[in-house]
Image (cartoon, rainbow, N blue to C red):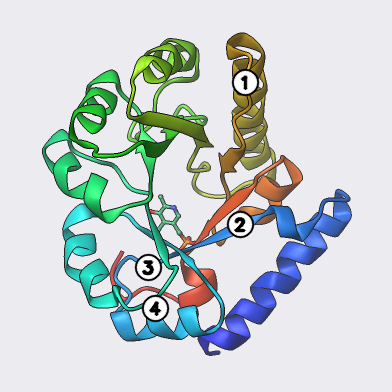
Amino acid sequence: MNIEARLRVLKERISAACEKVKRDPNEIAIVAVTKTIPAQLIEEAYALGLRLFGENRVQEAREKIPQLAHLQGARWHLVGHLQTNKVKYAVKLFSMIQSADSVRLLEEINKRARNKMPVLIEVNTSAEPQKHGIHPVHVSRLLEKALSLEKIEVMGFMTVGPYPVDEKRSRKAFALLREIKEKAEKEFERTFSVLSMGMTEDFEYAIWEGSTMLRIGRGIFGERKQA
Ligand SMILES: *Cc1c(COP(=O)(O)O)cnc(C)c1O
C-alpha cells in the first residue's frame, strides 16, 4: 500500500468510528506523525492534503523541518517528550507543544517563546510508570500555573493510550482525559478545545471517547524501520 491508499483506508475508518457515535469526522484533526520518515514521503503526504505534522524528537525536527520550509501552510507539533535544554529550539520549530507536563517546562517555554505558544498538557492516564505526562491528580495545579504564564496558551490535553492496546483499558484512559478536560473547564471557567488522543492502533476507541485530534504515524506512512 502507498500513502494515498493508506490515507483512504484511514479516512474510511475514521468515518466509520464517527458514524458509530454520531460524530462529524470534520471535527477530528489528523496529525501525521513523521518520526523516522524522510522528507520526500512527507511531501507526498502534503500533496494529498495533510497539513499538520508531528515529530517526537527535537533533534530530528531540527534537521527535517527546515528542509520542508517550502510546504506552505504546513504546521508542526511536538508530540514527544521535551527536555528543558531543547525548549529554545522547540519554540521556534513548532506551532504547538503537545507534551507540556511540568511547571519547570512551562516556565522555560514561557521564558523562551517570542509569541504566545500553544500547548497541550500531557497526562499519564494509564498509570504506566515509564510514561511521560503528569499524573491526573496534579493536573489542576499545573493548569493553574500554566494559565498564569503570559506566553503560554493552553489549548487542551494530550495522552498516549495504554500499550498493548485493549478496548477496555484504552477506552478507560481516553474517557479519563475527557473527564479531566470537562472538570478543568468548570474549574477555570473556560473551554479547552483540543483532546489529542488516539494513534494507529487505538484511534477508534479515542474517537468514541471524544478525541478531537488523532496522531497517526504507521496508519499513513506504513511500518517504521526503527522506532
Ligand atoms: C509515534 C507516535 C505516534 C504515532 O504512532 P503510530 O502508532 O505510528 O500511529 C503518536 N503519538 C506519539 C507521541 C508518538 O510518539
Residue type for callout 4: Ile
Q: Looking at the picture, does residue 111 appear above or below residue 142? A: below
Q: Identify the residue position indicated by label 3 in the image.
A: 34
Q: Identify the residue position indicated by label 2 in the image.
A: 29
Q: Earlier in the sequence, mark 2 or mark 3?
A: 2
- Quarter of the view holding residue 36: bottom left
Q: Is residue 89 left or right of residue 165?
A: left
Q: Residue at x 59, y 30 (%)?
A: 192
Q: Earlier in the sequence, mark 1 or mark 4?
A: 4
Q: Identify the residue position indicated by label 4 in the image.
A: 42
Q: Is residue 110 left or right of residue 165?
A: left
Compute the Cα span from label 1 to label 2: 21 Å
Residue 81, can we see it?
yes
Q: Identify the residue position indicated by label 1 in the image.
A: 190
Q: Looking at the picture, does residue 108 appear above or below residue 73? A: above
Q: 148 or 197: which is nearer to us?
A: 148
Compute the Cα span from label 2 to label 4: 17 Å
Q: Residue at x 29, y 26 (%)?
A: 106
Compute the Cα span from label 2 to label 3: 16 Å
Q: Earlier in the sequence, mark 2 or mark 4?
A: 2
